[in-house]
Image (spheres, grey):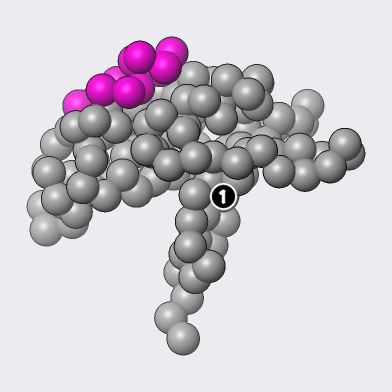
Amino acid sequence: MSLNTVCWADVPVKNLDRAIAFYTAVLGSAVSKEGDGGFTFGLLPHSEQNASGCLVETEDNEPSQKGPLVYLSVEGRMDSAVAEVERNKGKVVSPKHAIGPHGFRAIIIDSEGNKIALHSHTG
């Protein structure tokens, strides 16, 4: 069984519903609102064996443009994903560009102020 080095990411947000709408549009798949009254989060799309993460709105975690850069897959739909960023209150910092044999990435600021990389093996 192969394990991913990165297995989960909590992405801090200021407004959970706004962040869910942003990531649903950019990723092209539904981000589901999960949890109970005590803790609610936005579960990023994934299959059972894939690493993933969630959007969390907590007082002890702040959106940031510094620190680790999380890469989110937008496989095969990079151009449409980047187009959705600004339509959904985000900002493109570095447009789609090749990263050698590893495909393509774009660096964005999400609707909450986090710096995130979008990745696709194909342009």
Where, by quadrant of the figure, is residue 12 drawn?
top right
| Above or below 3: residue 77 | above
Place of residue 98 in the rendered image (x, y in percent of width and height, measured from the top left):
12, 43
Let me know if residue 65 appears in the view.
Answer: no
**Picture quarter with the C terminus:** top left
Query: Residue 19 or 103: which is nearer the viewer?
Result: 19
**Residue for point 46% across, 86% down:** 1
Place of residue 99 in the rendered image (x, y in percent of width and height, measured from the top left):
15, 47
Place of residue 35 in the rendered image (x, y in percent of width and height, measured from the top left):
77, 44
Q: The residue tagged with tag 1: helix, strand or loop?
A: strand
Magenta span: 83-95
Query: Residue 37 or 96: which is nearer the viewer?
Result: 37
- 42 horizontally vs 52: left or right: right
- 102 horizontally vs 74: left or right: left
**Residue for point 29% across, 32% down:** 81
Question: Residue 74 colored magenta?
Answer: no
- 45 horizontally vs 75: left or right: right
Amino acid type, label 1:
Gly
Place of residue 93 in the rendered image (x, y in percent of width and height, measured from the top left):
29, 21
**Residue for point 46% across, 33% down:** 24
Residue beneath label 1, please? Answer: 53
